[in-house]
Image: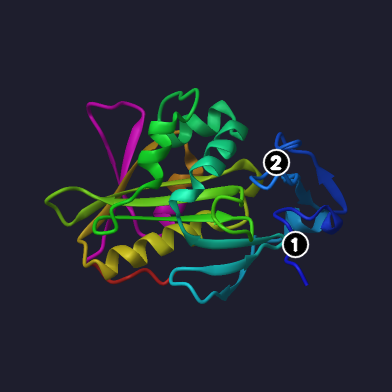
Amino acid sequence: MPLPRLTPAVLAQRTVPSRGAGILNRKGKPVNLAVSRTESSRRRPARITSRQLPERWSQQLQLDDGRILWLRPLDPADAEPIRQTFSLLSPEEIRMRFLHPVKELTPDMTRRLTELDPSHEFALVAAEPLPPGEALVGAVARLSIDEGTRRAEYAILVSHFLTGKGLGRMLMKQLIRWARLKRLDEIYGDVLDENTAMLDLARSLGFRREMLPDDPGIVRVRLDLRRKPSLQ
């Protein structure tokens, strides 16, 4: 039996249309990005069930609204689907991720985001249960080790049609796991001070905050990996 698509409308009691209507994957098949919302799911805490897949760092996820995703390492073939997803993001989502307005992901920017050096870079995506290059990507998490150091900078973007489902926490914990396996001392990220969702997530996982005197409005969050791991 084939796996459900990213957002099966059959699971929704009330389906909220998304700006993704009319998007096609690389096989020319329509991608339904509508978010399924019910009265009961709004009250319940987000819950994700997962099943390990054969490939390393890969899991099949089922969200609390029934949607199926694959959490897996980013592949260079994801470049074009990521560009498609970028076109669906609101200006506010883009500003929260890049800390300034970005009108489009150019081919060069996309190539730099998706062609990684595995010796010091790591990235995961949450995507449709389709092969890389065919699956629309709904979330990306990346960690990059600063040259000559034992510290790495993280970045996470979860599209609006997947927010509030616990994906950000799951992605961050996987980045932390990779950083510990690489025996890094610290991971950090720069966050707009109005991005309370990311700041709250970081605090709950043990990150400490500091203001950047030369960058008003930006908070740097740091996690000391030499301390005892958080159980959350």
- Is residue 43 visible to us here? yes
Q: Relative to 153, is 63 on the left or the right?
A: right
- Kindly identify the residue that appears in the image at 38 percent across and 32 percent down: 108
Report which residue position mark 1 lands on.
4
Name the element at disc 1: loop
Three-letter code, disc 1: Pro
Instruction: Determine which quarter of the picture holds residue 67.
Output: bottom right
**Relative to 160, residue 183 above or below:** below
Amino acid under disc 2: Leu
| Residue at 45% across, 54% down | 75
**Above/below status of 7 relative to 49:** above
Provide residue 59's location: percent of width, then percent of height: 54, 69
Task: Identify which residue, 90 or 197, lies in the foreground.
Answer: 90
Q: Is residue 225 magenta?
A: yes
* Eye-nearest disc, 2 or 1: 2
The residue under the point 48% across, 43% down is 79
What residue sits right under mark 2 in the picture?
A: 24
Q: Magenta stretch?
A: 201-226
Q: Is residue 112 magenta?
A: no
